[in-house]
């Protein structure tokens, strides 16, 4: 039989000679595996050594302490001549980190009551006192003056008016992976809670437990705010200034109206009527 190859037919492949297409497939598979391993190694090195480049890389358990420190900085920056206190933290669950993953967002804030209505002046003073790395600034737009800053680790800081002579400063994480969750600074009882309970006796006593919020101050101390709510108003409805002015001799008065009374002494006290009850806060704040 002749060894010539018949036209139109491929020469037979021996058992030890893989077809060219099969060899290419093996090389492609090997290259894909090698590339995947390289990407995995690079990702591990990046996570270990590089700082986060997007918010989604820092979970709520890691971002929470940044928010706590930011609130302390904001409280210290309010300065003298105003009444400032910590707001309870707000944790919003159920936001979407990615289309496939749920997350949570943390907001903490400071409420500030001014003796006048110069909101822009207060926001500018706060911006000037914040750390330089925050790049704080105040802009005036259609909604009035707004303070914005970056506290680091993708924590956004904002300040704006919430009413005449009233400002709210906030630090917000945005939506994050939950991680181990947020643990607020320890705050139980204390002299602020005792004072709040004592002052509310003039309005029928406190109804429900006293809530205490805390935040670390820039100098190392701890700021604390105790919040309590009275029982429903009595028919004779004692006035706020008339009742509280008897226990604050020598205090610095911030605001005094029938529905709102605020002063500063060794602590900051703010009382206001809300829905037929008296809500009272007693705070030990940060100072510079």
Image: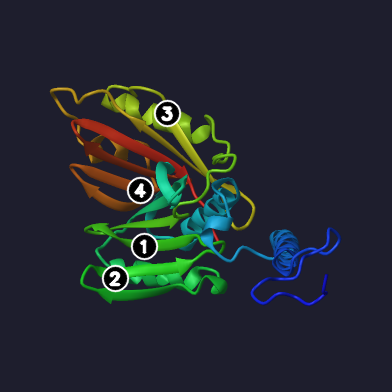
Q: Which label sits in the foreground, 3 or 1?
A: 1
User: In terms of image quadrants, where is residue 166?
Assistant: bottom left
User: In terms of image quadrants, where is residue 156?
Assistant: bottom left
Q: Which of the two labelled residues, at mark 1 and mark 4, occupies the earlier sequence position? A: 1
Q: Do the CB atoms of the residues marked 2 and 4 lie less than 8 Å apart?
A: no
Dot 3 crowding, Cα within 10 Å, few <14, some 14–19, many 20+: many
Q: Which label sits in the foreground, 2 or 4?
A: 2
Dot 2 crowding, Cα within 10 Å, few <14, some 14–19, many 20+: some
Between the residue at mark 4 and the residue at mark 3, the CA separation in whole angstroms equals: 20 Å
Q: Do the CB atoms of the residues marked 4 and 3 lie less than 8 Å apart?
A: no
- Residue 145's disc is 2
Regarding residue 63, the answer to whether it shows in the image is yes
Nearest the viewer among 220 and 250 is 220
Q: Is residue 15 above or below residue 91?
A: below
Between the residue at mark 1 and the residue at mark 4, the CA separation in whole angstroms equals: 22 Å
Q: Secondary structure at mark 2?
A: strand
User: At 29% across and 59% down in the image, what residue appears?
Assistant: 115
Residue designated by label 3: 210
Nearest the viewer among 29 and 287 is 29
Q: Position of residue 151 (x, y in %)?
A: 52, 64
Between the residue at mark 3 and the residue at mark 1, the CA separation in whole angstroms equals: 27 Å
Q: Which of the two labelled residues, at mark 2 and mark 4, occupies the earlier sequence position? A: 2
Q: Secondary structure at mark 1?
A: strand
User: At 52% across and 42% down in the image, what residue appears?
Assistant: 214
- For the C terminus, give its image quadrant: bottom right
Q: Which label sits in the foreground, 2 or 3?
A: 2
């Amino acid at each position: 039989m002749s060894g010539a190859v018949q036209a139109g037919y491929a020469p037979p492949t021996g058992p030890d000679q893989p077809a060219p297409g099969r060899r290419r497939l093996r090389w492609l598979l090997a290259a894909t595996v090698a590339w995947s391993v390289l990407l995995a190694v690079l990702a591990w090195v990046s996570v270990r050594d590089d700082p986060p480049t997007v918010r989604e890389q820092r979970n709520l358990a890691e971002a929470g302490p940044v928010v706590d420190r930011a609130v302390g900085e904001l409280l210290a920056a309010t300065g003298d001549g105003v009444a400032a206190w910590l707001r309870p933290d707000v944790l919003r669950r159920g936001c979407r980190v990615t289309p496939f993953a749920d997350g949570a967002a943390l907001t903490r804030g400071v409420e500030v009551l001014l003796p006048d209505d110069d909101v822009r002046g207060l926001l500018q003073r706060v911006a000037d006192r914040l750390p330089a790395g925050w790049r704080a600034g105040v802009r005036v737009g259609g909604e009035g003056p707004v303070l914005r800053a970056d506290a680091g680790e993708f924590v956004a800081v904002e300040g704006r008016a919430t009413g005449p002579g009233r400002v709210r400063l906030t630090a917000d994480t945005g939506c994050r992976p939950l991680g181990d969750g947020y643990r607020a600074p320890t705050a139980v009882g204390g002299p602020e809670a005792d004072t709040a309970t004592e002052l509310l006796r003039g309005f029928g006593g406190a109804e429900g437990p006293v809530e205490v919020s805390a935040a670390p101050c820039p100098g190392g101390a701890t700021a604390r705010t105790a919040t309590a709510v009275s029982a429903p108003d009595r028919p004779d409805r004692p006035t706020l200034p008339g009742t509280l002015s008897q226990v604050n001799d020598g205090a610095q008065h911030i605001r005094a109206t029938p529905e709102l009374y605020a002063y500063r002494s060794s602590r900051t006290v703010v009382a206001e009527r809300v829905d037929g009850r008296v809500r009272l806060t007693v705070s030990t704040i940060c100072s510079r």
